[in-house]
Image: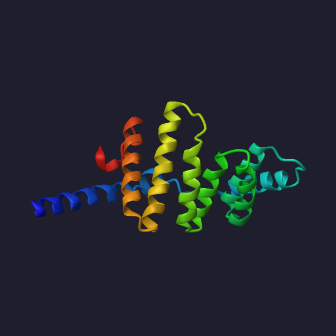
Amino acid sequence: MKNKKIILSILLFIFCFGVYKLDKYYNRTNTSLSLQETQITTYLVAHLENTPRLSTNQKLTLGSGYFALGRYDDAIKIFKIAAKKDNRANWGLALVYDKLEKPELVIKHTDLILEDIPPLSEENKNVQMQLFYQLRAEAHWKTRNYWGWFIDNCKFLKYAILSNEFPAFLQ
């Protein structure tokens, strides 16, 4: 009986580890820009930096521009300001902290996102939640919180099934 539990645990771990390694399938971390995209983003950031009073949406856009250009400290500053009025800024902060390899802060900001998820269509919600739980699972893995990693991967699979976007190894 004990051997059976060990074998089942190993199989479950292998299955979930496969879910964890789906970066090639979802590729949410690809932020490399072409030369034209870089020029456009640089122009947009320069324009927004010179705007005297930015709306919250403009702050989110500016933070995203900083993130895309690799200006992570600037992105953090602007996302923190925007987070006071709009919870979507916490998603930007989570992505920036993921790039900076700060998993504790990724988990903190993903928890803040869970407190107040903006209304989305059902289709967009499923895709967004897949990305959210994948990011969160990776942060749990890096902090050696394997139970949190397992739970988030199960939630990731739930939303993958709901959106009919199955990982490649399940097709």
The quadrant holding residue 149 is bottom left
Q: Position of residue 34 (x, y in %)?
A: 64, 57
The quadrant holding residue 45 is bottom right
Q: Position of residue 104 (x, y in %)?
A: 54, 65
Asked whether, in this view, residue 12 is left or right of residue 35, the answer is left
How many badges with numbers are in the image? 0
Looking at the image, which residue is at 36% across and 56% down?
A: 150
Q: Position of residue 108 (x, y in %)?
A: 57, 58
Asked whether, in this view, residue 90 is left or right of residue 171, the answer is right
Looking at the image, which residue is at 47% across and 38% down?
A: 126
Looking at the image, which residue is at 37% across and 45% down?
A: 157
Up-down relation of residue 160 to residue 103 (above or below): above
The quadrant holding residue 69 is bottom right
Asked whether, in this view, residue 131 is left or right of residue 93, the answer is left
Q: Can residue 166 be seen in the rendering of this structure?
A: yes
Up-down relation of residue 41 to residue 85 (above or below): below
* Residue sticking out furthest to the top: 121
* Residue sticking out furthest to the right: 52
**Which color mode does the image show?**
rainbow
Quarter of the image that includes the N terminus: bottom left
Q: Can residue 21 be seen in the rendering of this structure?
A: no
Q: Position of residue 147 (x, y in %)?
A: 37, 59
Looking at the image, which residue is at 76% across and 57% down?
A: 42
Up-down relation of residue 53 to residue 150 (above or below): above
Asked whether, in this view, residue 133 is left or right of residue 49, the answer is left
Quarter of the image that includes the C terminus: top left
Q: Nearer the viewer, residue 39 or 152?
A: 152
